[in-house]
Image: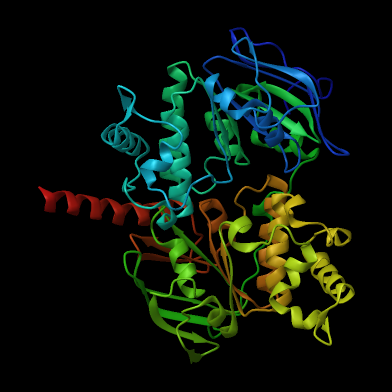
Amino acid sequence: MPEGMASQTMGRPASPGGPLAIDARSVEKRFGGTLALTGVSVCAEVGSINALVGENGAGKSTFLGVIAGRVVPTTGSVSIFGNPLAFGNPRLSRQQGIAAIYQELTIVPALSAVANVFLGQTVSRAGLLSERGMCDRFLELSAQLKVSIPPGIEARHLSVADQQMLEIMRGIQSRARLILFDEPTTALAPPERESLFAIMRELRRGGTTMVIVSHNLDEVLDIADSVTVFRDGEVAHAAPRSEWTKRDLVRAMIGHDLVEPSSRTPFAGKAGAAPLLSATGVSLPGALEGIDIEVRPGEIVGIGGLVGSGRSSLLRALSGFEPKSTGTLAIDGEAVPWPKTPRMAILAGIALVPEDRKTQGLVLGMSAMANITMPNFGGVASLGVISDRRMASSARGVARDFGFDENRVGTTVRNLSGGNQQKVLLGRWRYSLPKVLLVDEPTRGIDVGAKEEILVTLRRLAAQGLGIIVVSSELEEVVQMGDRVLVLSEGRAVARLDAAHAPIKVKDILEAAFKVAKHDHDRDGLSRG
C-alpha cells in the first residue's frame, strides 16, 4: 500500500502542480436517507488521465455523475477549468466542454450508427447538416479505433461491443476538453481496448483531461496518471499512478487482501462422461459457420476470440434467440429439435444469462425474489395465485447458495449493485434447474470483490453437475474458468484448448484468433488488389 495511507485515509489529495481541470471540494450527496458521497474532494490537472476505482456502491459513479452535470450534490462545490459547474444541467455541462461516455448504453436502436455518433450534434456548412461530413468523421474515428462498423447500419443490429464503440466515438468526436469514461472497456476485446487507450494517450498529449471509472485494475495501472480510491462514499486514498500496485489498490478498495483466484483448485468434470450438450454445424448467416461444441456435466467451456468473432452469437443461437440459426442438437445423448425460440431452448434444458443483464435479463422494477422465481412461478403458487411467502422462501434458499443477503430478496432489483444483480440472474436459473447454462460476460461492470464471488459461484454450479459455457472479454477469466476453451474467429472455430492436456494461456487464445484474422485480412486485401 502506498506509504502514508494509514494516516491519509480521507479528504483532499495533495494539490497537483499544474492548472486544474477539476477542483471538487467537500462534495456530499444524499439520495433520500442514503448518504452516497461524504466530503469528497478530488482535483485533476489539465491534460491528465485520472482513474476512479472502488467497489460497487462506493460512490465513484455518483461522483462521475456530479462532474457530468447529471447529479446535483447536496453540499459542496465543483469548478471545471476554473468556472463553477452547472449542476443538474447536462446540456450546460456540454457547453462547458464536458463529454460523458456511460456504461449503460444510450444508443437509439432505430438510428444508424453514424446518426448515433452525432446525436444532438451536426457537422455543418453554413448551418446546414452535412451528411458527408458526418460520414467522413465517422470513418476517420473507425480507423483510429480499428473497428469496422458500416455507417448506415441500424444500431439495433450491432453487438453490445459495437454499440459501446459508438458511445466512445460520440464522446471523442465532440472534441470536449474533459471526457468522462464510465467502464468504457467492459464489452471490448483486448485489441479494441488498446486502440481506445492509444486515442486516450493522443488526446492527453493534446491537452484533453480524462476521468475513467473502471473495475479493471490492470487497465487503470496502464492508462492512468493518478488513481483515487472510493470506499463507502468517501475518498479512501488518492495518489499518483507510480505509488500504486494492484495489490495496494485492492486493499484500499475492500479494506483487506483478496484471495488470488490462482490459489483455488478448479473443479474437474468426470473424465470420459458423456456430453450434456452436443451441437454440430451451428450456423447463422453472416455470423457463424459450421461450429461444433459440446459440454459435459461439471465442466466449464470458455469461448475465446476477438470482438465480432461470433462468441455471443453462438450463445444466442444455442439458446433460441437467433431463429435463423441452424444446426443439430443433442441433450443427454438424445436428439432434440434445433431451438428456434428461447422457450424451445428452456424446455430442452438450456438457459442463457445474457450480456446486458439490465435490458435483456432482469425486470428492474420487480423484487429480487420475483426475478429469481420468474421461470417457475407455478412452483410458488397456491390455487393459481402466486404466494409471496412461498416466493420469499424459495428465493432465500437460492440467495444463501449464492452469497446474496437473504434478507434483501424483497429489494427492488434496480436498487441492487451490479454484482448482486448478476447473482439474482444466476440464481434464477439455479432455481429452475437447467441442464446447461450459457453465460455471456458474467462479470461485466462488476467490482473486483463481487467478480471473484461470481466466478466462484459458476464453479460451484458446475460442481453440482451443470454444464456451463461462458463468454468473457476478460481472457484471463476464460483461462481461469475454462476446463476447455473454444477459440472463434470470423464466425468459425479455429482452435480447441484443453486444460487437461496443457495449461491454457491467454497468449494461446490471442495467437489462434489473430492468426486467422490476419490471414483473412491479408487474403481480402489481395483479392481487392
Left or right, 60 with respect to 524, comes to right
Quarter location, residue 143: top left
Left or right, 241 with respect to 502, comes to right
Using the image, determine if residue 309 lies above or below residue 2: below
**At 33% from the left edge and 60% from the top edge, which residue is drawn?**
490
Using the image, determine if residue 382 lies above or below residue 135: below
From where the camera sits, is residue 97 visible? no
Left or right, 191 with respect to 71, comes to left
Q: Compare residues 500 and 103 and report the one nearer the observer.
A: 103
Q: Compare residues 410 and 200 and report the one nearer the observer.
A: 410
Q: Compare residues 346 and 276 and report the one nearer the observer.
A: 346
Using the image, determine if residue 439 lies above or below residue 292: above
- Residue 405 spot, x, y in % from top left: 85, 58
- Furthest residue toward left: 529
- Furthest residue toward front: 127
- Residue 355 spot, x, y in % from top left: 56, 58
**At 69% from the left edge and 51% from the top edge, which residue is drawn?**
418
- Residue 517 spot, x, y in % from top left: 30, 53
Left or right, 193 with respect to 7, comes to left
- Residue 470 spot, x, y in % from top left: 55, 64
From where the camera sits, is residue 461 visible? yes
**At 34% from the left edge and 24% from the top edge, which residue is drawn?**
127
Quarter location, residue 395: bottom right
